[in-house]
Image (cartoon, rainbow, N blue to C red):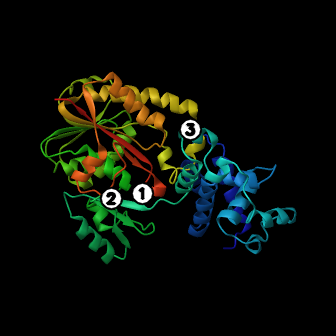
Amino acid sequence: MKVNVSQFNHLEQVLFAMLRFDRPADAVLTAHFRQHSKLGGTDRHLIAETAFACLRHLETLRPLCGKQVNSRRLALATLVRIGGTNLRELDGVMKETEREWLASVKGAELPDDLSARSGLPGWVIGLLGEQEEADVIALGKGLASYAPLDLRVNTLKMKRDDALIQLQDSGIACEPTPYSPIGIRLKGKPALARHPLFVGGAIEVQDEGSQLLGLLTGARRGEMVVDFCAGAGGKTLLLGAQMASSGRLYAFDISEKRLANLKPRLARSGLSNVNSTLIAHENDTKVKRLAGKADRVLVDAPCSGLGTLRRNPDLKYRQSVESVAELNAKQTAILASASRLVRAGGRLVYATCSLLPAENQDIVNAFLASHPEFELLPANALLAEMKIALDTGDYLSLRPHLHNSDGFFAAVLQRKA
């Protein structure tokens, strides 16, 4: 695809701002497009796709740029190495002094360096723990791939087979998700905002991995269930549907904005059992009132988000060893506080969208050591009970290159009766 000077200038500006890593990459892109509202759809697509491809493959691209690693050279290297653009298509954009270098970029050998070969910065590789180099490279390639668009069917309103037929009849190519019994995977990224199934609340956008976390919570009719870090409420809606809109479902969060985003989704869903509650912190009195009363508590803890690099490739540069250590303290405190709500025999699910043992197994092991009243329930056995053919051992551990979902972790804990 031929790239013109205007498109390239915008791409260079966007990358320059993104590579400062002082705010989310999608926020940079949104602000740029708002500022340049006359950019057409083709221009926006090229700029967005190339900029995010650069972030995905930055560790690979940097060594190819030689001593001049800047937004211009990175943009050119991305177009040629990742985007498959040929030099003729860069006439007018490429300087004559860059021709020889760019001609060498496409087939250049990468240095024998694990970061360059895996696409992951050194600090991430260090925290992944003892893994074979081949595993790190496979994981890095999976995280640099494009994420499919998954939907969850609202079982209050429709069966998955009926939703599949209606989507296909409206020209949307889709198939059942391989693991979640309530998931649909779309081919491509069709616009859904005005689709009757979306408007009517029969479908919601939700990654298959996220659906599995909700299903492991095992919410049932008439129970008291708490979504302790509800955010915009994707899992809250799943739990409510599992409960057939009966019992009481509390959606706690410290962000008023996130809970506000839940309201329109809640209205579409048809649920009437959700109590969305703003809390100041994990020890808020609104939390303490439910001590020992909840049948199920889901803790989708704040984390580094490194499991979502397919969607948010800049996170590997906006997080650090230090920020993960800060998150560990929060995760420990939140899990301890949430555990107080669980009744005897009740279930506590600790989950993250991280790949790091420090945010996952280490937090759970420390919790179990200090809370002998809880025991680990094997996730593979619970999934088998639900006839879900997925076995990642005692913990749910999802990887993009193995399961084609975001990277997720979940531990299912039970308070001893």
Is 149 on the left or on the right of 13, as rendered?
Answer: left
Q: Within 10 Å of the Cα at label 2, are there few (<14), some (14-19), or many (20+) other Cα atoms?
A: some
Name the quarter where the N terminus is drawn: bottom right
Q: Which mark is residue 366?
A: none
- Residue plotted at (28% across, 56% down): 388
Query: Disc 3 marks which residue?
Result: 319
Return the x and y of residue 139 as percentages of the image width and height. Answer: 53, 52
Is 204 on the left or on the right of 37, as rendered?
Answer: left
Marks 3/2: CA–CA distance: 30 Å
Question: Which residue extends farthest right?
Answer: 97
Q: Which mark is residue 179?
A: 2
Q: Quadrant of residue 157?
A: bottom left
- Residue plotted at (71% across, 62% down): 8
Return the x and y of residue 224 as percentages of the image width and height. Answer: 17, 37
Callouts 1 and 2 close, C-beta under 8 Å:
yes
Question: Which residue extends farthest front?
Answer: 132
Whether residue 297 is visible: yes
Residue at disc 3, secondary structure = loop
Query: Disc 1 marks which residue?
Result: 403
Q: Within 10 Å of the Cα at label 3, are there few (<14), some (14-19), or many (20+) other Cα atoms?
A: some
Q: Quadrant of residue 372?
A: top left
The amino acid type found where label 1 is placed reads: His
> Which callout, 3 or 2, points to the residue nearer the camera?
2
